[in-house]
Image: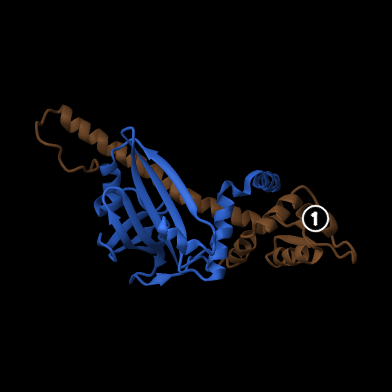
Amino acid sequence: MHDHLSSTFAALADPTRRAILARLALGETSVTELASPFEMSMPAVSKHLKVLERAGLIARGREAQSRPCRLEPGPLKEAASWIEEYRRFWEESLDRLDAYLREIRAARTKSKTNGSGKKRSRTKSKE
Amino acid sequence: MAQSANAANAGTEFVFNRTFDASREDVWNAFTQPGHLKHWWGTPGSSIEIAHHELKPGGLFHYCMKFPDGRAMWARFIFREIVAPSRLVWLNGFSDEHGGLTRNPWVPSFPLETLNTVTFAEQDGKTLLTITVVPFNASKEEAGVFAGGIAGMKVGFGASFKVLADYLEQRS
């Protein structure tokens, strides 16, 4: 299916590469410009750029010398939406848990005020 | 936590907190009893059917998430630590209908299993839940994929991620 998500995530695992992407979000940049804030050798930056390019996260111009880099939003967007799903899985499960715990408590309070006089029965949902 | 050592190569874990206005026992029961789990556990939009649930170290929780469009997806827990009502640890993964591990359908290089630890702490009559997810027995590649995905969720992206998020927003 979306096997390229794997290579996107692998590329995103490195903090320098994430920083490079963040820089490129501001606009197209030459490799030299890109390298300057990172205190890294050009070959080291080039290596990171290759990984990003292979993952489809950036594209590079043809101009022989500078080969400007630009962000390719597609794969990053796909990755962001998968990450969002994963987070949502937990978020929404816990929302449901929260609602369910309230239900349990409401049912318990109700059975108490009904004055059954019995000890707290095993908690059950409404049905 | 000692288990975090498993993720040492990744250097990354997914941590999630939530406070519930409920007693620790209630939250614990909701997490550990099949009769309760079916009311809330599972991917959003699905309802779960429980094939097996055995709450003991090494025990299996095997369930199927059913979606309104007819799709079904199996998953499983293997319980590792059960310390009622304060700590629950399990190996989490997708599975087939027989309980055999399967790959994450969306990200095949995601670790086959993650080690999920949930702690339940009393706090002013409420319950603070902390969920920690780390890769389990992952290859270097799988750990990297987990770290990359998780990094996107964390503030680790920080200000940079805000820039990226805004950028992606403009493009949508």
Q: Looking at the image, which is closer to me, B65 or A63?
A: A63
Image colour for chain B is blue
Residue at position x 90%, y 67% in the image: A64
Left or right for B100, reference A56? left
Foreground of the two, B88 or B60: B88
Helix, strand or loop at label 1? It is helix
Name the kind of residue labelled 1 in the image: Leu
Query: Chain under label 1?
Result: A
Q: In the rendered image of this protein, does residue A3 appear above or below residue A26?
A: below
**Label tally:** 1
Q: Is residue A52 above or below residue B21?
A: below
- Measuring from the top left, give residue A101's x and y in whole percent: 30, 40
Image location (x, y in percent) of residue B109: 54, 68
Camera-side residue of B87 and A101: B87
Vertical side of A121 occupied by B108: above or below: below
Q: Please identify the residue farthest to the left as the structure is shown.
A: A117
Could you tell me residue A56's position as x and y percent? 70, 63
The brown one among the chains is A
- Which quadrant, please, contains the N terminus of chain A? bottom right
Q: Residue at x 89, y 64 (%)?
A: A63
Q: Can residue A26 be seen in this view?
A: yes
Residue drawn 21% across the image and 42% down it: A123
The C terminus of chain A - image quarter: top left
Choose top left, top right, bottom left or bottom right for residue A79: bottom right
Residue B8, image x, y percentages: 51, 62
Please give the residue where the numbered disc 1 appears in the rendered image: A34
